[in-house]
Image (cartoon, grey):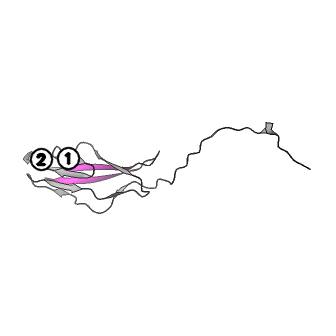
Amino acid sequence: MTASLNPYLFKTAPFTVVVLPYPNTGAPKLMGSMKNPWVISVGHTFKQNLPTIKDPEGDSSTVQTIGTLPSFVTFSGTAFEASPGVNDIGSYRIALNLTDNYPNKSLSNVVSLEIIV
């Protein structure tokens, strides 16, 4: 006895399969310690690089400041520079958003820094 399939009983349809290489299990973090708070004297310049940023899955990461930096502070890439004047005496809080570049579901971690002039 020979069995055969009836081609009129089957239907084909195109489809797309998206396979992500791994789940996104965590946001990037600063590895190592960093001086916090930064105590800076008027008329002096303070420079600080962020420690290495590491994401649990090895995704690339971006760093952005949240809000406006004090006028005497600059931030470029992962480096801060602060040169306060006499009118800048006070306490300031800076927030950074570390975000991984995972497709479709990025995760973030917020880091706070304090500056005392």
Front-most of 60 and 56?
60
SS of the residue under disc 2:
helix
**Which residues fall within the magenta stretch?**
92-117
Is residue 116 located in the magenta-colored stretch of the structure? yes
Q: Kindly identify the amino acid type of the residue bearing the numbered disc 2.
A: Asp
Left or right: residue 1 compared with residue 106: right
Question: Magenta segment, principal secondary structure?
Answer: strand
Q: Residue at x 41, y 48 (%)?
A: 101
Q: Position of residue 92 (x, y in %)?
A: 19, 49
Q: Residue at x 46, y 55 (%)?
A: 25
Question: Mark 1 or mark 2: which comes first in sequence?
Answer: 1
Left or right: residue 21 compared with residue 5: left
| Residue highlighted by disc 1 | 74
Tell how many labels.
Answer: 2
Q: Position of residue 33 (x, y in %)?
A: 27, 62
Q: Position of residue 83 (x, y in %)?
A: 13, 50
Is residue 23 located in the magenta-colored stretch of the structure? no
